[in-house]
Amino acid sequence: MSRAGRSMRIGTLMVAGVLAGTVLAGCGDDTGRAGDSPAGKSPGAREQGTKAVRSAYDRTAEQDTARVTLRVQTSARGESATANGRGVVDLEDGDSVMTVTTQGQRIEQRVVDQVLYQKVPDGQAPGGKPWIGIDLRKVAEQQAAGDRSMSDPARSAAFAKAIDDRDVTKKGTARIGGVDTTHYRVAVDVAELPDGAALRRQVGPTLPMDVWLDDDGRIRRQQLDMAFEAPAGSGPSAGASSSPQRVKVRTLMEFTDFGTEVEAEAPPAKQVTDMTTKALEQGRTTG
């Protein structure tokens, strides 16, 4: 599989987590600062760090499967909403099984063949069916055809591959899930990304990303911070004002237990309400 294909498999999981926090609910810094210290300032060290970050997505995907935890925190106008997910993911084909908790609700979630399924809490099922479905391919197509909304962390793999040696700083070490890791901070030059001019107007000149890599170069933790102007009615404070608002999104993902078993099956079609159109509408308003 190509580098881009492997990176998008990880991205599929991340965008699924974001949708879990936004489609149904309308939407703590855990950065592991242990051992944080200035490092990697020499040209050789910076080059080594850049190479490590660029190759991390392939090295992670090569493990086939893993357990994953995901946290997506969205804030605007002093209010915030958080979605937490925990489960297993197939890093080869993007399938996953997770339980997502958001605003006090627990949601069963599956991704099968790039379709996101969520089991709706009792009393909230649209059309009287227990599951909703969102075609992630169509979501990705909209982002490719339009302004490529920066609220989609699935593009984080592309962010990493757009960096050069000036953009990577080795911050130190941290122990995550019982594993020693090296922490790199990445300042992505937005102008170097596809549609960079449009993205720069949304999020500014740089985009901050942090990754923690184990001794085998695999991602153990990734944090992506985004801030952008969204129309009124977007974000956790939707409906509070008729004026545009500044929305901040922090996505934190961790991998453990590489090689764990993953069994993801789509629910029966007659039990699923297709919510792809709603997801696309929300993408257009936040893009």
Image: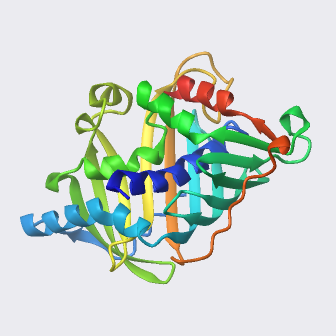
Q: Is residue 200 left or right of residue 98?
A: left
Q: Is residue 130 left or right of residue 25?
A: right
Q: Residue at x 73, y 53 (%)?
A: 266
Image position, residue 175 (x, y; %): 43, 79
Image position, residue 211 (x, y; %): 37, 62
Image position, residue 25 (x, y; %): 72, 40
Q: Residue at x 60, y 28 (%)?
A: 280
- Residue reaching furthest to the left: 43
Task: Classify 221 as above or below 18.
Answer: below
In this rendering, the count of numbered labels is 0
Q: Evaluate whether residue 279 shows in this view.
A: yes
Depth order, front residue of 141/244: 141
Q: Quadrant of residue 3?
A: bottom left
Color theme of the render: rainbow
Task: Classify 5 as above or below 136.
Answer: below
Q: Quadrant of residue 78?
A: top right
Depth order, front residue of 88/234: 88
Task: Classify 176 as above or below 16.
Answer: below
Q: Residue at x 63, y 50 (%)?
A: 82
Q: Quadrant of residue 269?
A: top right
Q: Quadrant of the N terminus?
A: bottom left
Q: Residue at x 43, y 36 (%)?
A: 150
Q: Evaluate whether residue 29 shows in this view.
A: no
Image position, residue 267 (x, y; %): 78, 52
